[in-house]
Image: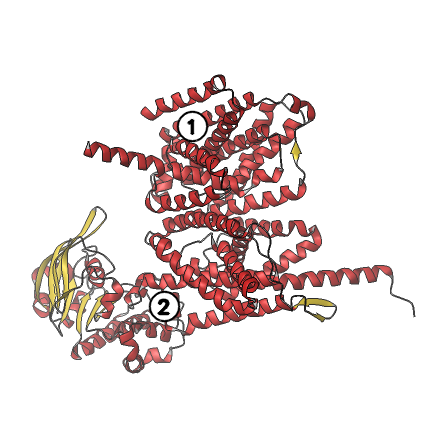
Amino acid sequence: MLEVERLEVGYGALAALHGVSLTVRPGETVALVGPNGAGKSTLLKAIAGLLAPRAGLVRWEGTPLTGEPAHRIVERGVALVPEGRRLFARMTVRENLELGAFTRRAQAEKEGRLARIYEIFPRLRERDRQLSGSLSGGEQQMLALGRALMGGPRLLLLDEPSLGLAPRVVETIFGILRQLHGEGISLFLVEQNVQAALTLAQRAYLLEGGRVVGEGEGRILLQDEHVRAAYLGPLARRG
Amino acid sequence: MKWAWGGVGLGAAFALLPYVLQREDLLNLGILIFLSVALAQSWNIIGGYAGQVNLGHAAFFGAGALVTRSLWVAGVPLLVALAAGALVATAFGLVIGGPAFRLRGVYFSIGTLGLAEILRISVGNLLPEISTIPAASLAAYSLLPRYYLALGLAILSVVAVALLARSRLGLGMQAVREDEAAAEASGVGAFGHKLTALAISTSLAGLAGGVFAYYHVSYYPQHAFSPTWTFDALLITFIGGVGTIHGPVLGALFYVILKEYLAVRLVDVHLLIFGTLFILVVLLLPGGLVEAWARARRLVYRSG
Amino acid sequence: MSAPPISARWREGVDVILAQQLVLGLLVGGLYGLAAAGLSLTFGVLRVLNIAHGELLMLGGYGSFWLFTLWGVDPFLSLLGVGPALFVLGLVLFIVLFRFVVRAHEEIRIKNSLLIGFGLTLVFHTLAIRLWTADERSVTTAYAGAAAKIAGLTIPLSRLGGLILAFAILTALHLFLTRARWGRAIRATAEDWEAAALMGIPVERTYMLAFALGTSLAGIAGGLVSVAYSISPAIGLEWTLKALIVIVLAGLGSLFGSFAGGLLLGVAEAASVVVVGGAYREAVGLLLFLVILLTRPSGLFGGR
């Protein structure tokens, strides 16, 4: 279980998160939606250990995560698929995947997991010797997802998985996320595509201006007046 | 302001020294200190205020020395020779700075490193023989004018830095040093400021080289291009307090006196000590002696 | 049958001299490449420019020299000791100094690494002079004079061995970087350290490994220099510049690119010797360096 308690994160003099609290229970899929600049990415980066919070606590499976370096957090079973994928463009698909299993624990399961990833993403197997920089957007997202899964995470953090992808590709990706959910992996995703996110997630939080302003079941939020007005108008329904 | 009065007092003391103590070794030590102050302050302008690490400062010192020496020995009046030396040094500075400053900082650093070496090698090949003063000048050689010339140069360099530090130009340089992109965004032309800093820096360095050439009776021309001068400039500036007005002065006093003291028993050991001190300063005490002094005073005030 | 005209025989003689020089240039070029590869690795991964790289090479050279002089260890064999020793020194330097430098962002990182490298240069250079004097040393093995004679050209075997070994080591390093788990971690960290951290890669430890590999390469190159050429404390700065010249020529990012760049520099130097004479050998390389540095900006930062 992931517990975020009154997390405060700032960049220099600016504060991006003002005391954010939320939870992700084991096996749950939770979404975080909100406008641009609300601090969604910041929250994920802080959980993953790329940013140090100014105050507050993040707990994973009972023990604190805050203050741990990013690579240690990965070893604890939490993996982030960063915004924009951040693939190693000059390395091949296979090399990227194998790097995902860098930790010693993951090394033991490497071959098995690689085979499994290729099963879920046959397109990656086809392109496994190709430089990852030359893949299409959708393939890159699959690779980023696969790479994170190579570490055998119990909690997957996803930062804008649908960004820049065509609707059909988004469907495929979200289908796979549903599959992962079915296998018991907890998912916490930050998404611009509110429709897709709230359909997939059991629960969702609303983040505005660095604060949690709403929480509820995915389907119920989908019907909520404020949410519909702010995020599901013709402008928001872009993905 | 206290420092300013201290500086004036120090300058006056040095000016009166030859009348109080007629000791040649002290005069020589004094000249060494003054040259070091000038050399360090000249580096301080480009490295401390403008934040561009010049790793080949010897190139400009050497150029000034070479040109001044050649002209003066050939009969050209000293002041003209000095001016020419400064001019040539500045020209070299612009040749490197012009292209290098449009690129990232590191290009300037390694570019100056390469320039100094190229000049040292070339001069060593073209002028391998020792340079001596013609017999007539040798007979008339007096330490006093050289002492006052060097003192004057040291004072000039300190005043130059003092004026620069508070001027718009100087503040612009410091803005570029802190964050070039932000400086550009607020209208401070980074390229112009860097190049101006380099021009002032190299002309001062060239003058220092010229005074050196006027002072030494005989030396190998390539010695003026030796990396030693770059080392000295950086060591003195950083240990004294980079980017401050009085840092290089403190540093020069500390450096030259300690060096002379150590040289009696252990040649070159001063470089080990200062090299280590330098690294410690860069990592732990970026303000050098100036900062150390300020911290010590605060400690005393707090406990007193 | 009449003898060929004098002019033709003279031209043939010059051709042989030229060819001989080019071959020798090629042989030393391999070591240039090896030296550059170490610096390139460190800069490419850590964004740290260790100006003291040449001093580390010099230390490696003295390592081989003393192992040979005191205990008769064959210099090529001594590399098995020198390599690891310089690797450990690299670990120490990282833990004590450069670990703190890498915590800042890129521009400050580079600037601080230049300054610290500068301080280290001074310290190592002075230490070497104190310990071993400024004399030139060379490892003269029993087979020192052995050379292969092919097509009228003399190819010193120890130098040939150096070239082959340099290539072999770079090949081994390449395999490490492409196949091994930690080698890939180094490449990943070089490309995007945050993404690497998200893979579970401990970034600081990876930096340390890359840095130590760089210093180890410098040491090995130094050992090869001591047997095929000569060493003295003065070669430190010289080889740092060689490495910088090659990096600017060949760009970052490829070990074999560095190797090829080194060969190119060696050949270019050799060709220039025939034209302007040996005294300017270094200067030509430096001139090439300055021209490329200032006109082709992408040199140091490659494809970034």
User: Residue C164 location in percent, x, y?
Assistant: 58, 70
Pointer 2 chain: C
Query: Between marks 1 and 2, how big is the CA–CA gap?
Result: 51 Å
Q: Is A27 situated left or right of C194 in this image? A: left
In this view of the protein, which residue sits in the foreground, C264 or A72?
A72
Image position of C218 (left or right of B79): left
Is residue B142 shown above or below C282? above
Look at mark 2 in the image and give the residue it sits on: C185
Count of picture labels: 2
Residue at x 49%, y 52% (from the top left corner): C297
Pointer 1 indicates a residue of which chain?
Answer: B
Q: Quadrant of residue C152?
A: bottom right
Q: Is residue B240 visible?
A: yes
Which residue: 58% across, 23% down? B79
Q: Nearer the viewer, mark 1 or mark 2?
A: 1
Disc assigned to residue A3: none
Is residue C191 in view from this perspective?
Answer: no
Q: Residue furthest right?
A: C1
Q: Quick one: SS at disc 1?
A: helix
Q: Residues within 10 Å of mark 1 (few under 14, many from 20)?
A: many
Looking at numbered disc 2 in the image, what kind of residue is underneath it?
Ala
| Residue that badge 1 annotates | B158
SS of the residue under disc 2:
helix
Q: Amino acid at mark 1?
A: Val
- Residue B150 drawn at (x, y percent): 51, 26
